[in-house]
Amino acid sequence: MLSTCLSLGRRNLQRKSRECVRCIATPSTADTEHTREQLRQLLRETAQSVAVVTTLVPSDPRADTNHSDCEKCHANAQGVYHGATLSSFTSIALDPLPLVAFSLRIPSRMATALNTHVNNISNTSTAHMVINILSAAQPDLAVKFSRPDLHPRPLEDLDVQWSKSEEGFPILSGTLGALSCTLISRSLPLGDLHWVPGRHPPEQVEGYGGFTSELFIARVSRVERVPRVEGQTEEHDRLRTLPLLYHRRKYATSCDIPSKS
């Protein structure tokens, strides 16, 4: 009788433990949405750096080639230069390797192109892209590269000045800095956590009209020399040394805090 009671007690304890773990690992949809909204409000009060990632979108045989005579628009018929604004770019490590990370909403041409580069390039030291960290003089570029509906090919605009990196990717002129980067692997899906070890069952992302995100982690292979903008004004030259930030749904920059001494 005693052994039976102990056995039943152990089974009940194990069952309750499993239920407790499930509660911790799998928050309800309502809790997730509440946390998401709180985080969104908090992040609006923080300042996020703004960057533009540029790469080459491999050519599609079915794509329109009417612009093939434009040297900057196409690279030897290999594809079309493309850029996208990042609001989630950050440095995540300097040692032992310099690593950066960012996320992209999907589906997107940029996410597809970067994953294609990873699949096609066997040399892991070859850069896949350039991350251009925008200066305070460039909020117009942030808008252009974030609105493909209004600016489907911003790198073709005459007022967007750029040069090519060693691998042939666009380096935007007048930025705070530019990084040639190599992806360490394909992107990680953020719509579920099936790739994370442990008890993290998939959770469908809701409320974004079918959009979700993917995480990209890249190694910085080279800090590029950024060309100046031709014909820039004195004000542009002053803002060139300040970062472009996104704060409270507006573009801003930094300022020094006065010393109390």
Image (cartoon, grey):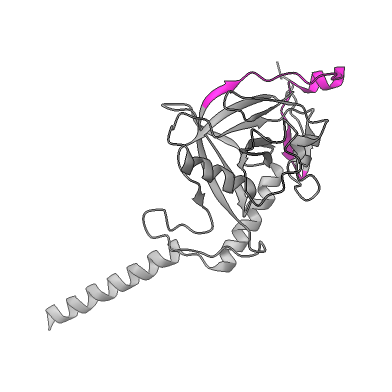
Picture coordinates of residue 181, whole percent (x, y): 54, 31
* Towards the viewer: 105 or 88: 105
Picture coordinates of residue 55, whole percent (x, y): 62, 36
Residue depicted at x 79% and y 23%: 239
Picture coordinates of residue 176, whole percent (x, y): 69, 24
Q: Is residue 42 above or below residue 235?
A: below
Left or right placement of residue 147 versus residue 49 in this view: right
Per the image, is 243 magenta?
yes
Query: Bounds of the magenta span?
Result: 221-249
Q: Is residue 126 above or below residue 229?
A: below
Left or right placement of residue 170 versus residue 230 in this view: left
Picture coordinates of residue 138, whole percent (x, y): 78, 31
Residue depicted at x 43% and y 63%: 201
Q: Is residue 29 above or below residue 72?
A: below
Q: Quadrant of residue 83?
A: top right
Q: Quadrant of residue 257?
A: top right
